[in-house]
Image (cartoon, helix red, strand yellow):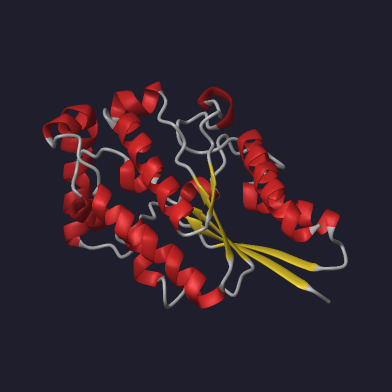
Amino acid sequence: MDKFKITIVGNSIAFRIRPQIEGSKNYGQYIEQTLNERYPHRHNTVENTAFSRATVTDIQAILHSSILQEHADVFIINLGVCDASTREIPFWYAEIINRKKDGLLKFAFQNFHNVFFKKNRRFFVKLRGKRTWISQDKFAKIYTQIITEIQRAHKSKIITLSINAADDRVESILPGSRAKYIIYNKIIHDISKKHHAVYLPLDDLKSSVHFPDGSHFSDLGHKIVAERIMQLLHTDNS
């Protein structure tokens, strides 16, 4: 039996559903369902390796030990929002409070964040100069590395997704994020074009309907993304 595999590399945008309702699916699950309906005599799989808070540096850290071990026909790269959002705390601080292993340092930093930073996020975002966790130059460098090393290892088709536009809620809490997303999307677009990846813009999607919490897709949002990705795959798999 022929095999066809898609691997999704990304953050929680690639799997979380808002709101989570019975029967809802993320776009990877919708793609796998559609592939199996259209090509029932082929073994179709969609491996979603995305995880919460993933930045390009997180993916870089596991690129050789994990991502490049995925022998997929297509890679979907869904990164950027965690890198490009303005933040009230620096990346090193966030790494401490989000450690998997509990400890005194994590406990102390978490409590200080909840009491001091979290309640005044907008103020501290501005105080830090609306800085992101990952700078534009660093993002571009590592994003390029991720794409080129996947292509070198597997010669796979790569589809890159844009960052969802920051709605009023996100912009209110994390001021400056809207402008940053536009800049980082251009970086993703330009790198994709240069390295022959397929860039999928999602600028026309509406937060109120397609990503109601300002970041994560609704069931309908995931369904639309899946349909658009399937359109990109149609030529190669018809």
Residue at (44% x, 46% y) in the render:
189
Regarding residue 175, the answer to whether it shows in the image is: yes
In the rendered image, residue 188, in percent from the top left (x then y), is placed at 42, 48
Taking depth in this image into account, of 31 and 51 the one nearest to the observer is 31
- Could you tell me residue 213's position as x and y percent? 47, 31
Vertical arrangement, residue 96 with respect to residue 130, above or below: below
- The answer to whether residue 98 is visible is no
Which quarter of the image is occupied by the C terminus? bottom right
Q: Residue at x 14, y 34 (%)?
A: 129
Residue 198 in the figure: left or right of residue 175: right
Residue 220 in percent (x, y) is at 66, 34
**Image-based side of 61 in relation to 218, left or right:** left
Residue drawn at x 20%, y 40% as measured from the top left: 131
Q: Looking at the image, which residue is at 59% across and 35% down? A: 218
Quarter of the image that includes the N terminus? bottom right
Q: In the figure, residue 25 lies in which quadrant?
A: top right
What is the x, y in percent for residue 186? 39, 41
